[in-house]
Image (spheres, rainbow, N blue to C red):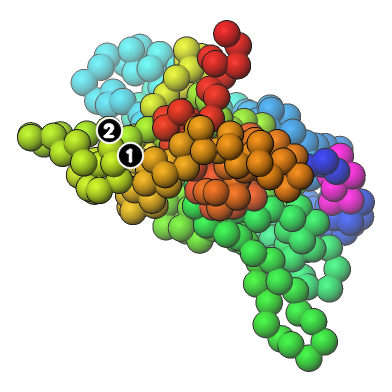
Amino acid sequence: MIKINLANEEELRQKHLDNLKPEVQKKLEEKIALEQDSNLGNFLKFLNEEIDVLLCGTPSELISKIKYIEENYFISEKKMTTILSRRESAQKLKKDEKFTLLTKFAQEEHLFNHLSEGAFFTVKQFEEEVNSLHKEGGKWGSYLETLKEIFNYNAFSENKDGWGAYQLVTDLDISVCPYCNRSYITTLLRVEDDDKQTRPELDHYYPKSRYPYLALSFYNLIPSCSTCNGSFKGVVDFYEENAIHPYQEEFLGAATFKTDFNKKEPYDYRYLLGLSKDFKIILDINTKNEDLKGKINKTIYTFGLDRLYNTHQDFVRDLIRNGIVNNKSRIDEIYDKFGDLFNNRDEVLQSVFLNYVNDQDLGKRPLAKLTQDICKELGLLETQIDKDS
């Protein structure tokens, strides 16, 4: 929902690469030297050649690598299960029709180069050959464990002294979950005799169970709260259906929080005065960009944002009451009278509503996006239309 804006992004990417590349490459080269399976050996050589992209490539570069790897080298068993569930029934088709349907399906799902020609004549042959790929002794039977050993996320996650999850989130210095903008994601490291420490969870935007070679990728590690990462997203695969990527996009004006009447009659107008909870909080999608609209809808659905934000009606009621007392004229009056305390009008709103309302600071406190949007609805903040007119 909120973009991760880093002033030192390139510096952190390079630091991530410099710290991880030597160890990962060492493991790759050791495996390549010992590997007797030419298929796996060729795959590992490819990973070694592309290590910079796999560790620090942009999201679009990662998507490109996933596609190429799946077409030419490997598809994880977890993803294979999903792929097979999408296959249409071909039992009642004629032989040539089955061949055409299964061939087209294999090409669309990146399976074609991994199967023999005979796999496409019957559904039974097709499923048997696909399922055999991951069985012990099959073409990919040992791939997953090899990849998990090379791209060792557990070691990275538990590393508290060198470059690992703790140091990464410390350097990122992100205060609030970018997926939901509802929860603080605090990082505290061990100091002196105090053993207590905590850090945000790291969500794999592209699940490591499906793409183990991206388990350590900089742009695949999204600091997030446990609700978003564990309770809602889990292993949802954003490669197959894109959502908002926090390093690239955000909601801002493309999706706006608004208040609306419940679907009940008679309508309780008292909520407009902050006196009633008989209203709902909606996310109004304003963009005409169909690609962005799809990503926003996927994000809202995956993280349950529409339902979660309707648990904050008391917060919105306070915003409404506060907005009635501290209306636009009152905000202007405070700014005029105490101008030496504030650099701009937004800082007055920040002080009155105890939250940030400007775009660049929405990731600093929970519910800042909701606060900004309700302030706009109350007429306390200019909308983009107001600014452009």
Q: Residue furthest left?
A: 266
Question: Looking at the image, which is closer to me, 42 or 312?
Answer: 312
Q: Position of residue 168 (x, y in %)?
A: 77, 58
* Nearest to N terminus: mark 2 or mark 1: 2
Q: Taking the image as drawn, is residue 146 in sight?
A: no
**Dot 2: what SS?**
strand
The numbered dot on residue 367 is: none
- Binning the other alpha carbons within 10 Å of mark 2 as few (below 14), some (14 to 19) or many (20 upward) gives few
Relative placement, left or right, of 308 versus 369 is left
The numbered dot on residue 281 is: 1
What is the quadrant of residue 39 in the picture? Answer: top right
Relative placement, left or right, of 265 versus 86 is left
Q: Quadrant of the N terminus?
A: top right
Query: Badge 2 is on which residue?
Result: 260
Name the amino acid, label 1. Answer: Ile
Which residue is painted at 19% across and 36% down in the image? 269
Bounds of the magenta segment: 10-17
Q: Position of residue 320 (x, y in %)?
A: 37, 43
Which residue is painted at 46% across and 37% down in the image? 327
Name the amino acid, label 2. Answer: Asp
Q: Is residue 13 magenta?
A: yes
Relative placement, left or right, of 368 versus 58 is left
CB within 8 Å, label 2 to label 1? yes
Q: Quadrant of the C terminus?
A: top right
Q: Is residue 385 magenta?
A: no
Q: Position of residue 216 (x, y in %)?
A: 73, 52
